[in-house]
Image (spheres, coloured by chain):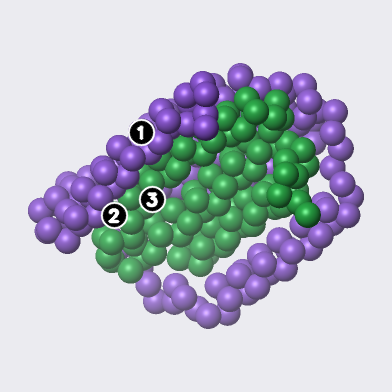
């Protein structure tokens, strides 16, 4: 059952991911954003299959919720008619496809030939309680946690500064 | 056939490749930015899979931090794009050639 679910979610993730990048029917950034939401939701399904329940919830809340709403707000500020009139450059697409296919070939061959997962069983139960204990009680990740909160503050101040009308 | 670590890593690699393809191929700054998010998510998937199969929690904690940093990164990046759009009235990389010699 879990294996079937893995194949379903993996296929959905890659399908929607492809539609984000190269939708044959629409070049509208809003369509890309909507398919990115679906990609992220399918990825959350994969996280659930990996027993990372908390991360699946955070993925939906933060990515599909907050980040994508931000994206859509910014898209609304712009002129999206412009995008649909432009064509892809054939040479650029061909070179991009070649480069990406080469990279994927190398990585995929490395993964399959190296036997990286040989003999490893999916043993780990990463539920929310264990994750919370590791984050806050072990002391190992307390400093990174505080630094991340400072990073968020800095990002907030930076965004306010950048959004001012008369940007120097 | 049982689903193992390799399967998750292959999905992750394919998703990363799709993101990279988007960054190379698309010419709209916003769509390039979405492709970047796709690549970040591919890395997250690989980390969670490693965490599960190696019986180690550090991967999941790492993903937690990556999601937080990505949220901060998106807010700053989109503010930059909006500021750029105000000056140039375009979010197209081909129109942004000020630094070209």
Name the chain under label 3. Answer: B
Residue in front for this viewpoint, B28 or A123:
B28
Q: Are marks 2 and 1 on the same chain?
A: no
Q: Colour of chain A?
A: purple
User: Quarter of the image holding residue B45?
Assistant: bottom left
Along the horizontal axis of the image, is A125 left or right of B28? Answer: left
Pick the front one: A139 or B58: A139
The answer to whether marks 1 and 3 mark residues whose Cβ atoms lie closer than 8 Å is no
For discs 1 and 3, the disc positioned in front in the rendered view:
1
Mark 2 touches mark 1? (CB < 8 Å): no
- N-term-proximal mark, 3 vs 2: 2
The answer to whether residue B46 is above or below residue B89 is below
**Mark number for residue A157?**
1
Mark 2 belongs to which subunit?
A: B
Look at mark 3 in the image and give the residue it sits on: B66
Q: Residue at x 33, y 56 (%)?
A: B62
Residue at 24%, 54% (x, y): give it.
A144
């Amino acid at each position: 059952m879990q294996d079937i679910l893995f194949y379903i979610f993996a296929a959905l993730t890659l399908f929607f991911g492809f539609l984000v990048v190269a939708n044959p029917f629409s070049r509208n950034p809003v369509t890309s954003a909507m398919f990115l939401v679906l990609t992220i939701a399918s990825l959350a399904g994969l996280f659930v299959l990996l027993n990372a329940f908390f991360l699946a919830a955070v993925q939906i809340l933060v990515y599909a919720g907050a980040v994508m709403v931000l994206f859509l707000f910014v898209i609304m500020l712009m002129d999206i008619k412009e995008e649909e009139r432009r064509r892809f450059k054939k040479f650029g697409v061909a070179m991009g496809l070649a480069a990406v296919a080469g990279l994927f070939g190398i990585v995929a061959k490395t993964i399959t030939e190296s036997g990286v997962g040989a003999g490893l069983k999916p043993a780990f139960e990463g539920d929310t309680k264990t994750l919370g204990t590791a984050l806050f009680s072990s002391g190992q990740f307390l400093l990174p946690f505080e630094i991340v909160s400072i990073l968020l503050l800095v990002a907030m101040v930076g965004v306010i500064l950048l959004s001012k009308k008369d940007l120097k | 056939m049982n689903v193992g670590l390799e399967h998750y890593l292959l999905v992750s690699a394919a998703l990363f490749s799709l993101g990279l393809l988007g960054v190379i191929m698309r010419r709209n700054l916003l769509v390039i930015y979405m492709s970047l998010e796709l690549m970040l998510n591919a890395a997250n998937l690989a980390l969670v899979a490693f965490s599960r199969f190696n019986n180690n929690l550090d991967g999941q904690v790492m993903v937690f931090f990556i999601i937080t940093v990505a949220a901060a990164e998106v807010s700053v990046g989109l503010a930059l794009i909006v500021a750029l759009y105000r000056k140039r009235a375009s979010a197209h990389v081909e129109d942004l050639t000020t630094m070209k010699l």
